[in-house]
Image (cartoon, rainbow, N blue to C red):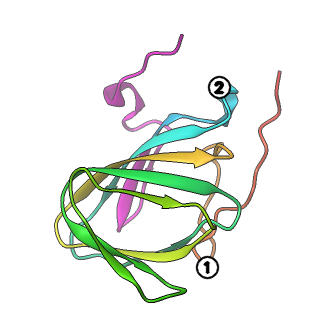
Amino acid sequence: MIVRTLAEIEDTDADIKTENWRSKRIILAKEGVGFSVHETTLYAGTVNDFWYANHIEAVFITQGEGEIEDKATGEVHELKPGSLYLLNNYDKHQVRPRTEIKCVCVFNPPVTGREVHDENGVYPLIVEETA
């Protein structure tokens, strides 16, 4: 059993900070459970282009409001507490928070924590060595 708190992750190498967002990686590939779990904060007024070409991501909004645009279709969806979006087709998307958004994100395959978004908003696929 693994039990962690966000306080244990804050200001460690599992707490990734950018000018647009902050991601606290709670469960990573090294745990060997087949997915990773993050608490992500998206800052109000930012524009965030993402494309997880190598990962499926589910995002559950717990706080804040904004919108997400499907870059392939131009379709825009409102985001608010209780909303979930699933990027099940490796969807290119843009998230535009009107207020600070807090969300819980689940990635499959799991991220290792060493990934960095490239110029297209893509995380490379990094495979964690198993013990």
Measure the alpha-carbon separation of dots 1 and 2: 28 Å
From the top left corner, tell me how far across and down residue 55 is, in percent. Answer: 65, 57
Residue 89 position by quadrant = bottom right
Q: Is residue 14 visible?
A: no
Residue located beneath label 1 in the image: 120
Within 10 angstroms of label 1, few (less than 14), some, or many (20 or more) residues? few
Q: Amino acid at mark 1?
A: Asn
| Closer to us: 19 or 53 | 53
Task: Verify whether residue 8 appears in magenta.
Answer: yes
User: Residue at position x 64%, y 46% from top?
Assistant: 108
Q: Quadrant of the C terminus?
A: top right
User: Residue at position x 70%, y 27% from top?
Assistant: 32
Q: Is residue 67 above or below residue 27?
A: below
From the viewer's perspective, tell me whether residue 70 is left or right of residue 60: right
Magenta stretch?
A: 1-24
Q: Which mark is residue 31?
A: 2
